[in-house]
Image (tube, helix red, strand yellow):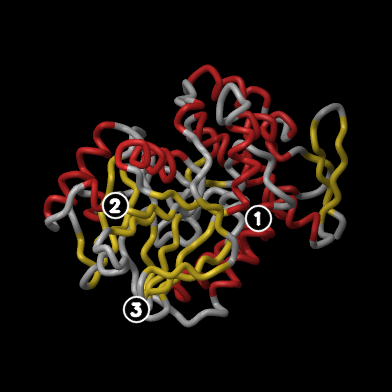
Amino acid sequence: MTARFDQGPWANAGVQTVQPGVHRVPLPLPNDGLHAVNVYLLEGLTDDGGLVMIDGGWAIPEARKALEEALSAIGRDLDDINHILVTHIHRDHYTQAVELRRLMGARVYLGAGERPGLDLLNKLRGGLACSLKVLREAGAEDVADRVEATYPDRYQASDWEAPDRWLDAETLRFGDSELQVIPTPGHTTGHVVFLDERRGLLFSGDHVLPRITPSIGFEAAAPGGRPLAAYLDSLHLMTRYADARLLPAHGPVADSTHTRVAELLDHHDDRLRKTLAALGDGTHDAFAVARGLSWTRREVAFGDLNALNQMLAVNETVAHLDVLVLRGDVAVAFTDGVNQYTRTR
């Protein structure tokens, strides 16, 4: 799950040149969990000398200022950004891309699997509706009520617009350069990563993160199928490509995508075992199971998490239980508005 952790120097404002023509820029976020989101500025890809930007950041004044300062440091400005490739629809990745398009006409690209979520965001009062529904069906009515009361939803319908281009599994060509678009559902249904095979770089968004495990299925629309099962398949998919340097949305650049993928797969295998053990005998809802588990790398008790992270914990427990159902280890029955799980072997 995504929770507060030691940010480290990667989140400090400034520009890191990963290699010539590839710059990592951390932009600030208005919350106390993750302090920054990395966007990447790519030079030398387009015939007109413009920039390709990967992910947009959150549309807040502090993020725009940090981006402008970073651009100035490499001798550029906002008008040089011609294309913005967004890994997924979450506001810390998408909303500033929309704002930059309004300001200077940059083209915005987004995975086609995000279309249902975008359509729903244009209809909903807020962006937490699906997660709150999962909470209530998990038996966590109290957590849902506290999240609604404690965390004002910053959702604004005007922050989201359709992209200029929907992306499928394809290759984007900018001059003589190519970026492979690889759909990686799990974190969101339409999440994509961008692979530069020639330079050995993977722009992984929130799919592969070097220090934390991404939340699963946290989106406005109901995730398609079982989001954790899709996420595990998407992790395995990464091993079918040559290893590449990992350029994530949160955290420092890492040398090997494959190494981190192996760690994430091991983590979820361990989590599935612990979830099954926490379910134990009898029949229980996901809220009860989540309370029997510890959370974050510091093994924090469920009751010591704030309401927002309790929501993420319960939703993640649901995702793991759903995989156990898929594997035949657990049965589920929907009773009086709550899913009840029973161990089968």
Please report whichever mark, 3 or 1, sits nearer to the chain's N-terminal start. Answer: 3
* Percent of width and height locating residue 323: 73, 56
Instruction: Judge from the rendering whether residue 285 lies leftward or rightward of residue 317; answer left or right.
Output: right
Count neighbours of disc 1 (C-alpha within 10 A) and say few if under 14, some if 14 to 19, many if 20 or more.
Answer: many
Please report whichever mark, 1 or 2, sits nearer to the chain's N-terminal start. Answer: 2
Question: Which residue is identified by label 3?
Answer: 199
Numbered disc in front, either 3 or 2: 2
Q: Is residue 234 visible?
A: yes
Label 1 element class? helix
Question: Which residue is identified by label 2?
Answer: 81
* Percent of width and height locating residue 161: 50, 36
Taking the spot 28% from the left edge, 45% from the top edge, the residue there is 27
Measure how far apart labels 3 and 2 are at the Cα level.
Answer: 21 Å
Task: Judge by depth and name the residue closer to the eye, 47 or 297.
Answer: 47
Taking the spot 33% from the left edge, 41% from the top edge, the residue there is 100
The quarter of the rendered structure image containing the C terminus is bottom right
Label 2 element class? strand
Count neighbours of disc 3 (C-alpha within 10 A) and say few if under 14, some if 14 to 19, many if 20 or more.
Answer: few
Please report whichever mark, 3 or 2, sits nearer to the chain's N-terminal start. Answer: 2
Taking the spot 55% from the left edge, 66% from the top edge, the residue there is 182
Numbered disc in front, either 3 or 1: 3
Instruction: Judge from the rendering whether residue 187 lies leftward or rightward of residue 206; answer left or right.
Output: right
Task: Judge by depth and name the residue closer to the eye, 107 or 322.
Answer: 107
| Vertical side of 80 occupied by 197: above or below | below
Q: Disc 3 marks which amino acid?
A: Arg
| Vertical side of 144 occupied by 300: above or below | below
Question: Which residue is identified by label 1?
Answer: 228
Measure how far apart labels 3 and 1 are at the Cα level.
Answer: 30 Å
Instruction: Judge from the rendering whether residue 176 lies leftward or rightward of residue 267; answer left or right.
Output: left
